[in-house]
Each structure stands twice: as structure tokens, then as C-alpha cells.
Amino acid sequence: MREFFERISKIDRRIIYLIVLVGVTIPLLTRKGFEFKPLPEVKNAYNFIENLPEGSNVLISIDYDAASMPELQPLLEVMLRHLFRNNLKVIMMGHWPLGLPLGQIALEKIAKEMDKKYGYDYVFLGYRPGIAAVMLNMGKEIRMVFDVDYKGVPLDSLPMMREVHNYDDIALLIGFEAGSVGDFWVQFAQARFGQKIILTSTAVVTPDLYPYYQAGQIVGLIGGLRGAADYEILVKRKGFAYTGMTAQTVIHVIIIALILLGNIGYFALRRMR
Amino acid sequence: MKKEVPLIITFISGFLLIVALFIPHEPFGSLQERFNDWYIIVSGFTLILGVDSLLLYHWRKIKTKDKDAPYSIILIITFITVLLWGIYSGVKHGNPFAPASTFLRYFYTYMFVPLQATMFALLAFFIASAAYRAFRARGLNATLLLVSAGLVMLGRVPKGEIVVPFFIAITLILIAIIFVLEAVARVSLYERLLYFALALISLIAIIPLSILLREYLPALADWIMNVPQLGAKRGLFIGIWLGAIAMAIRIILGIERTYLK
């Protein structure tokens, strides 16, 4: 009996890795999704975008990189589709230089799919160093930070940017966060300039952003793959995030089962001693 | 003078920035913008500093024939290749990340992104293994953490409420077994009856708890996230930022000088 409990409290890590691999791979390959209700914070974000007047400017900040791509990239694509479908204008920039091309790739892809024109419907500004300083200066005049776009074209040459000077001309800011830049957006763009913000983040970062949502400092919060899947349900275009949630369900169940197993072994051995 | 000059610069910059926040009129009004411009420029130079220290570190390893020198050689070769490739694509297309650039298509999309994503994806395996090994209900705090983590993990995924009764049943049966074993080990009749009663309560609780959690698990997970989690987070944040303010004052006043070393 003792041997059995010792075995279940010391499962070889390679077996655990194999269980995790199978648990994640099969749901992703079968692409089967479960039905579920979107979270209220995601619904609020969706409703806010739905209620924006046509032609409003939306600033998107890419503050993640390839490490967080599985969680945030599907959401970025589905949000871009939603924004373009509602005829909103997109201005993209970012504070993570290594992740910015991911935003650019998604923007070019969705803009082409939705037949949107560069300079008229969307603009890609790129990256400037100095997170807080960039945010503060943008509150006064965007040209103080970005006088040209990523191709070096002056902002005034781009028709949709001619009337955009600071946060007053931006109806909504959407931050895609894998770190602490979201906190800076709230502290500088929202607290100082009253900018309306929706934050989307990896599941690890999401608990840090809940205080802002509960305090009404951000109008919506879309956290992790679950948030992305909720958003896909709301825009009625179920994609990778939605099917990915099945893999997440399976892996959560596996982890809890493993924890339970570990605890059974731990308590049994403790009693035997 | 090596210490005094940086201390004076820090004091003047810090003091002026605080004044500029509270007095938005000239000559202080435009100070913040000017400092922000300088900050952006200095931030740009820190990238160069980072590259310099990285290359120097690995160059020294190669020179001293360290056992990890082969990795340093790979790093320097990769660094130069990526740099030259980026410059070439930048010159050819006006921007290394232009849609037609080979740098974006081949290096970024097919090498950098999969490598970085793979590194992060490995976390799933390590987390599962670490949770299994370390997450033990050793005391009240650990048990509370374990139970709330389990409820949130299942409450935030689809169909979690279907699985939860199964875990509840196993956990309560185990608790009942522990109580029965405790009862058998006791001499006093009163203690024996008490432990048997507790075991019975654990078994009876399976059905109502399962029904309740099946119905209210997502709401319970939301409550954990919105009330206890948020309360703790707020406390942490307040503590962190009070500490940050204290540290900023110490730096401005020159009490904290470790950044000079």
C-alpha cells in the first residue's frame, strides 16, 4: 500500500509532460468547442465598441510579443474585424518593439480582408522608446512623439491623421497587454487625460487589471484566451480562441486531478509515518 | 565630484518634475514636455548600452575560453547576421518590417516568433509538473489557496461545472476516510463519535455541495476574482506604490545612492 501511495505522490515528470501534451494536442486538433456565456467585463467592452459612432478613431497599443501570441493574437484579429466592420478608424502603435510586427501583420491581413485603405481607414505608427513619456506627450500632441508613421510618411500627409492631435481626438484606446504597460495607460492616459480604455491581457496579467475595471477606470477588460473566446462569441465569429478553450478546460482538469493525486499520496504517507 | 554631479542632476530633475506637475504655468509648464523629450532620447540610448554590455559579456567569455564559449560564439554570429539582414531589408524596402521584406517574412515570422512562442509554451509542462509537486494542503493557508485556485480554474473554463462534482466527491470521500482513521485511533468514546459524525457529514455534504457548485461555480469563481482577490491586490498595490514614492523621495534627496554603483 505504501508503495502505491509513494508512486502516486512521485509520478515521473516525463509522464506528466506526456499527459499535458496529449491533453492539449487532441482538443486543438479536433477543434471542438463548448458553449459558454461571455463574461460581463467582455460584454461591456463589446458594447462600448458597438456604440462608438462611425468614423471614430481607435488607438491600439501592441504591448506583447510572440510569447503571448496564442492568447492575444486571435483577439487582436477578431477585434480588428469588429472595428473595421463598424467603420471605425484604427491607429496602431506599441511599446514592445519585438511584438509590434505581430500587430502590423494582423492589421495588414484584416485590412486587406475588409477592403480598408492605409492612411484613410488605418495607420501604423510603430514604436518610440520611453513608455510614460510617450503617453504623456501624446496627450498634448501626437506629433511630438510620432511626427511620421512607420514608413517615414509625415502624419499630416495621411488624411485620417490630419485632425488627430491628442487623446481628445481618440474615442477609445485598446491596450493588448502582456506586462505592466496597461498600468501606465491607466495612470497616464486615463487618469490625466480621461481617455476611455479597454484593456485586453494575458491570463497571468488579468488579475492585476481587475482593480481598474472595478473602479471604472477602464470600460472593459478582456482577459486571456477565455476573454478572446468570449469576444469571438459576441462578434459571432468563432475561431482559434473559442476552440482553444476546450484545450484549456482539459488542461485545467488535468492539473487539478494531478494536484488531487499528489495530495492523496501526501496525506496517506503522512498518516503511515 | 564623480558622485556629487549625478546627485545634483537627480535632485534638480526630480524636484523640477514635481514642481511642473503642480504649477502648470511658465516657466515650469513646458518643463515636463522637455524632460519627456530628453527621457525618450535617453531611453533610445539605453538600447545601445544594452547591446554593448551583452556583446562585451560574451566576447569576454570567448576570450577567456569559458566552457560556455561556443554558445557565446553562436550568439555573436546570430547577432551580426540579424543586424546585417535587418539593415539590408531596411535599405531595400525602407523598413525592415515592411510587408515585402525577407527579414519580416523569413527571420521574424519563421524563426523569431516560433522560437519565442516555444519557450513560453514550455511553461504549460513546467506549471503542470510544479503544481503537482508543490501544491500540497500543508496548512490552512495552503488549503484555502488550493481550494480557491481549483474553483477559479474550473469556474473560468467552459463545462468546468460538470467536472467539479467529481472532484468534490473524491475530496470529500478522502476527508471522510481521514476522519474515520482518526476516529479509530482515538480512545475516548466522545472523540470517536465526534470523528465518525464528521466523516458522516463529509459524505452527506457531497450531494448538496455538488448540486450547488454545478449551479453556481462560474458565479463563485467571479466572486473570488472580484472580492478576495481584488482586496488582496489592492492592498498589495497600495503597499507597492507607497514603497515606490518613498524610494523616489530617497533617490531625489540623495539618501538612496545604489544606482550610482
Image: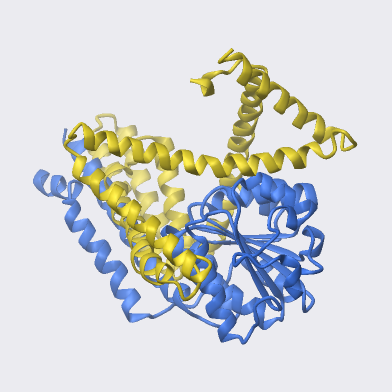
Chain colours: A blue, B yellow
Q: Quadrant of residue A223?
A: bottom right
Residue A28 rendering spot, x and y as whole percentages: 34, 75
Question: Which quadrant is the C terminus of chain A positioned in?
Answer: top left
Q: Which of B49 and A60 is in front in this view?
A: B49
Give the total of numbered labels. 0
The residue positioned 48% from the left and 52% from the top of the image is A204
Name the outermost residue toward the right: B25
Spot occupied by residue B146 in the image (x, y as percentages of width and height): 40, 46
Q: In this view, does A224 lie above or below A271?
A: below
Residue A37 can be seen, yes or no = no
Does A198 sit above or below residue A238?
Answer: above
- Give residue B188's position: percent from left, percent from top: 28, 29
Residue located 56% across and 46% down the image: B229
Name the residue rendered at 34%, 36% in the picture: B56
Seen from the viewer's position, the closer of residues A253 and A70 is A70
Q: At which x and y percent is residue B201?
A: 40, 50
Question: Do we see residue B179 in this rendering?
Answer: yes
Q: In this view, does A194 lie to the left or right of B143?
A: right
Residue lying at 67% horizontally and 39% vertically, measured from the top left: B38
- Foreground residue among B78 and A99: B78
Left or right: residue A84 versus residue B2 is right
Of residues A49 and A214, the one drawn nearer to the viewer in this rendering: A49
Say which quarter of the image contains residue B232: top right
